[in-house]
Image: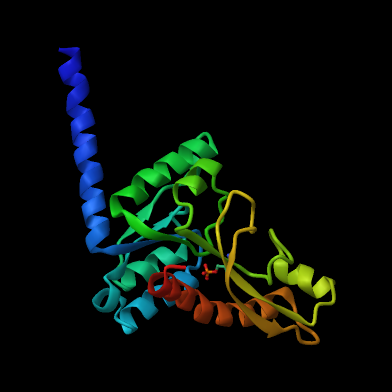
């Protein structure tokens, strides 16, 4: 009896995995993770729509997931007709528990690519390992310079003449994965962190959709 009880869920789990795999072979799903404004998510979703990624390559944004129910990007995603989900990190006692819950929401989409777009949580090695090679981030500096936070103020304080942004693979070391794309902007006299951030952001909206497109075109 206990054996039957054991086999049932195992079989349905295997069937579910097969369903996910079948889905992945037909459709290349992108899952985007956000925490805030979501302007990079919007840039990617708009590029997908305008450039007909679904029709050309079977690539679509399947879901936008936020750890923050108040993220403005959730409304923007809904306005674009995208499916949204919230996994509030504060409901979990550990990073591991949060990441497990997040994965449970991501996996049904069988993502070909998971895109971090202003997702302000450090992910556990287990999560990063699971999505290795299909997990990318955009960081607002010219990596390897200025990993971590407050990148714009730090670039100004260091007297940099240029700043920029980097799209990179995510590995378990913060902001250290292979660089996929970069854009450079000038640091102008009188710049504040906000004016520099705004200049960088306009470039992010160009290079992030392009890097996602490259991922599917070239299998970067
Ligand atoms: C961007 O500057 C990105 O580089 C950083 O967080 C910001 C997110 O902006 N990781 P948005 O939420 O995409 O508008």
The structure residue drawn at horizontal position 68% and vertical position 67%, both measured from the top left corner, is 143
Relative to 145, does residue 189 appear above or below in the rendering?
Answer: below
The picture places residue 66, in percent across and down from the top left corner, at 44, 56
Taking 128 as reference, is 182 left or right?
Answer: right
Please say whether residue 219 is visible from this viewpoint. Answer: yes
Relative to 203, does residue 15 appear above or below in the rendering?
Answer: above
Q: How is the image coloured?
A: rainbow
Q: Quadrant of ligand 1?
A: bottom right
The structure residue drawn at horizontal position 55% and vertical position 77%, both measured from the top left corner, is 204
Relative to 8, does residue 37 appear above or below in the rendering?
Answer: below
The structure residue drawn at horizontal position 45% and vertical position 46%, both measured from the top left corner, is 130
Taking 29 as reference, is 194 left or right?
Answer: right
Q: 140 or 171: which is nearer to us?
A: 171
The picture places residue 194, in percent across and down from the top left corner, at 68, 76
The picture places residue 13, in percent across and down from the top left corner, at 24, 36
Q: 219 or 107: which is nearer to us?
A: 219
Taking 135 as reference, is 157 left or right?
Answer: right
The structure residue drawn at horizontal position 24% and vertical position 77%, both measured from the top left corner, is 55
Relative to 153, does residue 127 appear above or below in the rendering?
Answer: above
The picture places residue 69, in percent across and down from the top left corner, at 43, 54
Q: 151 or 53: which is nearer to us?
A: 53
- The N terminus sits in image quarter: top left
Taking 202 as reference, is 155 left or right?
Answer: right
Count of numbered badges drawn on the protein: 0
Please say whether residue 91 is visible from this viewpoint. Answer: no
């Amino acid at each position: 009896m206990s054996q039957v009880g054991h086999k049932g869920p195992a079989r349905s789990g295997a069937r579910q995995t097969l369903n996910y795999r079948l889905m992945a072979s037909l459709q290349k799903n992108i899952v985007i993770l956000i925490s805030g404004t979501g302007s990079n998510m919007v840039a990617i979703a708009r590029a997908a729509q305008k450039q007909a990624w679904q029709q050309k390559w079977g690539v679509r944004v399947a879901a936008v997931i936020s750890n923050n129910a108040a993220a403005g990007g959730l409304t923007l995603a809904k306005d674009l007709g995208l499916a949204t989900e919230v996994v509030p990190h504060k409901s979990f006692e550990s990073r591991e528990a949060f990441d497990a819950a997040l994965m449970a929401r991501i996996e049904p989409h069988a993502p070909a690519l998971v895109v971090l777009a202003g997702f302000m949580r450090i992910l556990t090695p287990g999560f990063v390992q699971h999505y290795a090679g299909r997990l990318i981030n955009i960081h607002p500096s010219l990596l390897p310079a200025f990993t971590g936070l407050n990148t714009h103020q730090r670039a100004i304080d260091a007297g940099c003449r240029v700043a920029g942004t980097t799209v990179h693979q995510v590995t378990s070391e913060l902001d250290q994965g292979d660089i996929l794309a970069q854009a450079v902007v000038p640091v102008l006299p009188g710049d504040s962190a906000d004016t520099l951030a705004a200049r960088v952001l306009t470039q992010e909206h160009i290079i992030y959709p392009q890097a996602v497109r490259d991922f599917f075109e070239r299998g970067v």
